[in-house]
Image: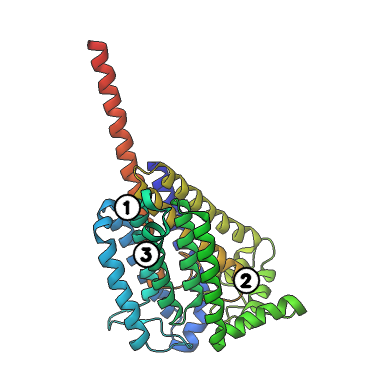
């Protein structure tokens, strides 16, 4: 388990180092144009990476069992914060997702996602014996998913809200919920989500553009078109770090949600595949940690954190390549970001602590077994 913990840490660390390089390359032109400084966005991202790594180290030493006591108060507080966000958050690009605390801006949806994972793991562990009972087991859990995802969608932040639902239902299925209950919930959430998405003009336009691209073979939008140009320009080995053409204001959000396109252009097909392979390693290590965790709460929490990271990575790459409609989800550990990056690091820190705690438990069991064997020999 110690090796798995180190694998998770170094994998995330390497991805963040790569992210620093690509963010510098992808943001330099925009930084000069907007802030008259080539290092403006890079410096901001570097600070967030340092904060993220610090939190990763801190949470790797905090016993994860302690989260059981705080999960309900934390999810209630985050629910209130999400409600507050709807009323006071400034509208940016048609959505109010950020709270300005003066010294820093935070996106409560990213915090709520991790807090909900912890609370779901706690509830699934607590209600394991009655989970198949819809009224007393399943319903009290799915209500929290509905509340948190609905408040996120109302910002509006459809991509995060929908993924919160999908990840939550996956954890509940693994946790022992009835497939029938999962299926009915999925259909209900999907229907409500589509209805809500069609109300807002920007989300409706994205969905219709994606459907139209399938029917007529047209471009989804400018971002995806430029992203595909960027990926295609990279060839097998890439054009080299710092030599991207699309980052020169051709590709919007080149340093953020569409950074995988710049990565593919500069590092080529081989570089892009190696990055995807890094996510696969992180996924396998996380699943093994979940499988070997010492208790059910640790198993579900480790699984939830792992599946959340890999799902976000998959959707980001799928958006960049035009496989799914355009969303505003960052590429984990690589995209320019703040709240998302920091809480991803906190999640990895928790995952590392689960691995270390399980390793100590295993050693304790082995030592006890050896002592018993010694006593038998003496007798």
**3 or 2: tag closer to the N-terminus:** 3
- The residue wearing badge 1 is 126
Q: Is residue 167 visible?
A: yes
Disc number for residue 57: none
- The residue wearing badge 3 is 116
- Residue at 69% x, 65% y: name it: 235
**Does the residue at mark 3 contact the one at mark 2 (Cβ under 8 Å)?**
no
Secondary structure under the numbered disc 1 in the rendered image: helix
- Residue 261 spot, x, y in % from top left: 60, 71
Q: CA distance from mark 3 to mark 2?
A: 25 Å
Horizontal placement of 230 versus 68: left or right? right
- Residue at 37% x, 44% y: name it: 293
Q: Nearer the viewer, residue 158 or 262?
A: 158
- Residue at 60% x, 71% y: name it: 319
- Residue 359 spot, x, y in % from top left: 34, 40
Secondary structure under the numbered disc 3 in the rendered image: helix
Which one is closest to the eye, mark 1 or mark 3? Answer: 1
Horizontal placement of 195 versus 97: left or right? right
**Does the residue at mark 1 contact the one at mark 3 (Cβ under 8 Å)?**
no
Secondary structure under the numbered disc 2 in the rendered image: loop
Question: Please, is residue 17 above or below residue 92 in the view?
Answer: above
- Residue 28 spot, x, y in % from top left: 50, 79
- Residue at 32% x, 50% y: name it: 353
Question: Please, is residue 51 above or below residue 213 in the view?
Answer: above
Where, quadrant-wise, is the N terminus in this rendering? top left
Which one is closest to the eye, mark 3 or mark 2? Answer: 3
**Label 1 CA crowd tier, 10 Å (few <14, some 14–19, many 20+):** some
- Residue 251 spot, x, y in % from top left: 59, 80
- The residue wearing badge 2 is 324
Instruction: Give the quadrant of residue 47.
Output: bottom left
């Amino acid at each position: 388990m110690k090796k798995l913990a180190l694998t998770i840490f170094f994998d995330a660390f390497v991805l963040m180092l790569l992210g620093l390089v690509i963010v510098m390359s992808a943001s330099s032109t925009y930084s000069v144009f907007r802030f008259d400084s080539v290092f403006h966005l890079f410096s901001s991202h570097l600070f967030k990476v340092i904060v993220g790594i610090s939190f990763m180290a801190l949470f790797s030493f905090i016993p994860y069992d302690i989260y059981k006591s705080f999960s309900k108060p934390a999810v209630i507080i985050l629910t209130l914060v999400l409600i507050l966000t709807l009323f006071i958050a400034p509208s940016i690009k048609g959505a109010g997702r950020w709270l300005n605390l003066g010294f820093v801006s935070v996106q409560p949806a990213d915090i709520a996602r991790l807090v909900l994972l912890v609370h779901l793991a706690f509830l699934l562990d607590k209600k394991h014996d009655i989970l198949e009972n819809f009224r007393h087991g399943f319903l009290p859990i799915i209500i929290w998913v509905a509340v948190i995802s609905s408040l996120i969608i109302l910002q509006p932040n459809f991509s995060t809200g929908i993924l919160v639902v999908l990840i939550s239902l996956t954890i509940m299925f693994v946790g022992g919920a009835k497939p029938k209950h999962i299926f009915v919930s999925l259909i209900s959430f999907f229907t409500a989500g589509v209805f809500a998405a069609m109300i807002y003009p920007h989300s409706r336009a994205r969905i219709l553009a994606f459907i139209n691209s399938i029917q007529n073979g047209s471009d989804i939008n400018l971002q995806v078109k430029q992203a595909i140009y960027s990926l295609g320009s990279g060839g097998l080995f890439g054009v080299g770090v710092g030599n991207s053409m699309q980052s020169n204001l051709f590709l919007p959000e080149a340093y953020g949600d569409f950074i995988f396109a710049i990565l593919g252009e500069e590092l080529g097909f081989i570089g892009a595949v190696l990055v995807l392979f890094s996510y696969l390693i992180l996924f396998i290590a996380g699943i093994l940690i979940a499988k070997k965790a010492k208790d059910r709460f640790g198993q579900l929490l480790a699984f939830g954190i792992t599946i959340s990271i890999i799902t976000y990575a998959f959707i980001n790459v799928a958006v960049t390549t035009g496989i799914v409609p355009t969303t505003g989800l960052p590429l984990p550990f690589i995209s320019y970001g703040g709240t998302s990056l920091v809480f991803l690091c906190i999640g990895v820190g928790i995952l590392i602590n689960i691995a270390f705690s399980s390793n100590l438990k295993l050693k304790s069991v082995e030592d006890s077994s050896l002592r018993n064997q010694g006593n038998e020999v003496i007798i």
